Image: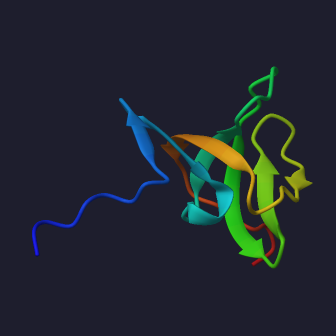
């Protein structure tokens, strides 16, 4: 067989990549596709159907559906206070 092709669910656009939330790695910074406010979140982990993420503006924890289409915009370090 020939060379393996890249996964079909990722479309690269310079440094941004469109994918589903469940494909992200811990610390990835993303926006939700279609969010008019373009808020940025940091991905923690998937826990079943939902995820554990942090809103970078307010610092609150949000639980985004794991199949949500997102665009990655950077990488950070996800730190849980008190641990």
The number of callouts visible is: 0
Picture coordinates of residue 33, whole percent (x, y): 70, 35
Classify the position of the C terminus by image quarter.
bottom right
Q: Nearer the viewer, residue 5 or 50?
A: 5
Q: Residue at x 76, y 63 (%)?
A: 66
Of all residues, the one furthest to the front in this rendering is: 1
In the picture, measured across the screen, residue 11 lies left or right of residue 72, that is left
In the picture, measured across the screen, residue 6 lies left or right of residue 77, that is left
- Residue 56 vs 66, above or below: the answer is above
Q: Nearer the viewer, residue 18 or 2?
A: 2
Q: Residue at x 88, y 59 (%)?
A: 63
Q: Residue at x 57, y 60 (%)?
A: 24
Asked which colour scheme the image uses, the reply is rainbow
The quadrant holding residue 48 is bottom right
Q: Residue at x 68, y 46 (%)?
A: 69
In the picture, measured across the screen, residue 59 lies left or right of residue 41, that is right
Classify the position of the N terminus by image quarter.
bottom left
Picture coordinates of residue 18, whole percent (x, y): 54, 42
- Residue 33 vs 66, above or below: the answer is above
Of all residues, the one furthest to the left in this rendering is: 2
Q: Nearer the viewer, residue 51 or 75?
A: 51
Q: Nearer the viewer, residue 83 or 47?
A: 47
Picture coordinates of residue 71, whole percent (x, y): 59, 39
The quadrant holding residue 45 is bottom right
In the picture, measured across the screen, residue 1 lies left or right of residue 52, that is left
């Amino acid at each position: 067989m020939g060379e393996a092709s890249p996964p079909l669910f990722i479309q690269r656009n310079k440094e941004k990549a469109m994918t589903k939330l469940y494909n992200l790695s811990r610390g990835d910074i993303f926006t939700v596709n279609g969010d008019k406010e373009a808020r940025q979140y940091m991905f923690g982990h998937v826990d079943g159907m939902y995820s554990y993420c942090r809103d970078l503006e307010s610092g609150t924890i949000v639980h985004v559906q794991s199949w949500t289409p997102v665009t990655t915009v950077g990488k950070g370090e996800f730190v849980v206070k008190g641990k």
